[in-house]
Amino acid sequence: MRPPCSVATAVALARARCFHSFDIIPAIMVPRMTLLPLSPDELLSTTRAVRKRLDFDRPVPDDLIRECVALAMQSPSGSNNMTMQFVVVRDAAKRAAIGEVYRQCYGIYSQLPGIYIGSIDKGEDAANAQQARSATSADFLGEHMGEAPALVIACTAGRAENLPAMMGASLFGNVLPAMWSFMLAARARGLGTCWTTIHLMMEQQIAEIVGIPFDSVQQVCLSPLAYTKGTDFKPAARPAADSIIHWDQW
Ligand SMILES: Cc1cc2nc3c(=O)[nH]c(=O)nc-3n(C[C@H](O)[C@H](O)[C@H](O)COP(=O)(O)O)c2cc1C
């Protein structure tokens, strides 16, 4: 016979069982980390690609990363079948190895006219000046990726090669919103990220460094993760919404 327990204990046990497979819920309902005072619109409009303002010297606590991943898992997924996976690399030797692969990929990318960020002509002076600043920033990350205290690789189960459109869109759609949520959650906590894909030129080498099963798992994004130097980021200049909306007809 089970020993009797108090109502409070019974409720606590029931709650523990209830949250067992949904242990993200308490993490979200009771944020443990301090959040920046940003409105939803401020968060959405100031989550920038951070490179030069990453603080490489300040460690990022694992629990903070866990919270960001828990929030990322609230993103949508096809058939409600969550296939996103996050590889968080803190080990210094592995970060350095990934940084070196990124540096090599960046060297190739920077020679590609019309693709390299610094080679794109935006057609007017102010936009070209902004593009040049972004290029300097990207060049910086090309040399320093491995110095971030953590590197986050967003992955999804499955590979995109030769998939029909519906399957391909679903495969990527299962992880891209999650990674963006991760980045928003990070920004809200004073952390900086930068979406990068250049390393995918040598995806298999990255897979080997951290043991990702390349044949069955697709990487989609590599981001440095670090506290930012200051938290005052601004909205970027962007074309007007009407320049990309097609009302009723393309
Ligand atoms: C699909 C994608 C791939 C990107 N790849 C890289 C990359 O490999 N390296 C990099 O430094 N930035 C990369 N970026 C970041 C962009 O350069 C950045 O979002 C853009 O310049 C706008 O900067 P902002 O968000 O700070 O305004 C990528 C962004 C996206 C969405």
Image (cartoon, rainbow, N blue to C red):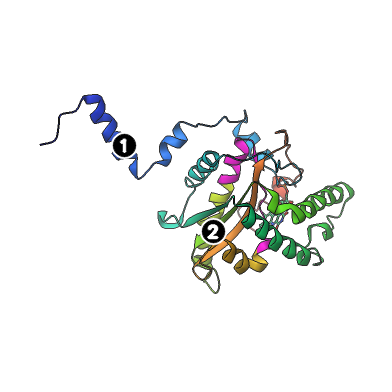
Q: Is residue 197 left or right of residue 115?
A: left
> Residue 80: percent from the left, percent from the top?
41, 53
Quadrant housing the N terminus: top left
Residue projecting furthest to the front: 93
Q: Is residue 197 magenta?
A: yes
Q: Residues within 10 Å of mark 1 (few under 14, many from 20)?
A: few
Q: Secondary structure at mark 2?
A: strand
Q: Nearer the viewer, residue 217 or 165?
A: 217
Residue 170 visible, this angle: no
Looking at the picture, which amino acid does disc 1 mark?
Ala
Residue projecting furthest to the right: 125
Q: Earlier in the sequence, mark 2 or mark 1?
A: 1
Q: Is residue 222 left or right of residue 103?
A: left
> Residue 243: percent from the left, percent from the top?
72, 50
> Residue 15: percent from the left, percent from the top?
30, 34
Name the residue located 69 percent from the left edge and 63 percent from the top edge. 101
Quadrant housing the C terminus: bottom right
Q: Is residue 196 magenta?
A: yes
Q: Which residue is mark 1?
A: 16
| Residue 186, quarter of the rendered image | top right
Name the residue located 27 percent from the left edge and 34 percent from the top edge. 13
Q: Which residue is mark 2?
A: 155
The image's mark for residue 229 is none
> Residue 69: percent from the left, percent from the top?
51, 45
Q: Is mark 2 within 8 Å of ligand 1?
A: no
Name the residue located 54 percent from the left edge and 74 percent from the top edge. 162
Disc 2/disc 1 C-alpha distance (Å): 30 Å
Mark nearer the viewer, 2 or 1: 1
Give the magenta range: 182-199
Q: Secondary structure at mark 1?
A: helix
